[in-house]
């Protein structure tokens, strides 16, 4: 039996799934997990497309969204906007 590595990007195939994934990670994850999740979503949508929309090169985008990276907040906002998401605060109960 041959197994393959699980790649969540293969399952992020519609906007609702992407939104649910990002929201879950934003609520439950730490900064490294959020950056990793953005990388998964960018990969699912297409790194070339996200790079064009953010004005970043593909290598810069891969580097910014890789494990243990510390991208600038501006980069995070550009990626969020490119994937069609926005940060919105809501009161915690």
Image (spheres, rainbow, N blue to C red):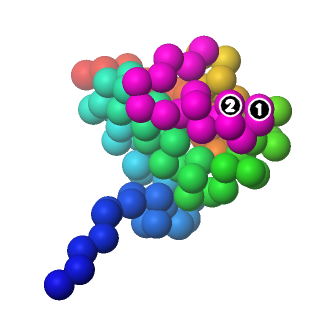
Which secondary structure lies at badge 2?
A: helix
Q: Specify whether 20 is left or right of 41.
A: left
Say which residue appears at 52% left-offset and 42% top-offset.
39
Q: Is residue 31 found left or right of 9 in the rendered image? A: left
What label sits on residue 56 in the rendered view? Answer: 1
Q: Residue furthest front?
A: 2
Q: Does the stretch in magenta take in 34? A: no
Identified at 60% across, 15% down, the residue is 72
Quick one: 13 or 92, which is closer to the camera? 13
Pinpoint residue 35: horizontal percent, then vertical percent. Answer: 46, 31
Q: Quadrant of the C terminus?
A: top left
Residue at (36%, 32%) from the top-left corner? 33
Instruction: Give the structural element (helix, strand or loop) at label 1.
Output: loop
* Residue at horizontal 53 percent and vertical 33 percent from the top: 65
Q: Are marks 2 and 1 in contact (CB under 8 Å)?
A: yes
The outermost residue toward the bottom is 1
Number of residues whose C-alpha sits closer than 10 Å to that of mark 1, classed few (under 14), some (14–19) or many (20 or more): some
Residue 80 seen by the camera: no
Closer to viewer: mark 2 or mark 1: 2
* Relative to 2, residue 4 above or below: above
User: The magenta stretch spans which residues?
Assistant: 56-72
Q: Nearer the viewer, residue 52 or 82?
A: 52
Q: Which residue is mark 2?
A: 60
Left or right of residue 40: residue 43: right
């Amino acid at each position: 039996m041959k197994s393959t590595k699980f790649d969540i990007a293969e399952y992020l195939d519609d906007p609702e799934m992407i939104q649910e994934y990002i929201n879950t990670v934003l609520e439950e994850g730490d900064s490294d997990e959020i950056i990793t999740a953005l990388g998964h979503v960018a990969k699912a949508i297409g790194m070339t497309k996200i790079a064009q929309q953010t004005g970043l090169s593909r290598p810069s985008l891969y580097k910014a969204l890789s494990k243990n990276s510390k991208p600038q907040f501006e980069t995070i906002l550009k990626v969020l906007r490119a994937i069609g998401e926005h940060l919105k605060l809501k009161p915690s109960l």
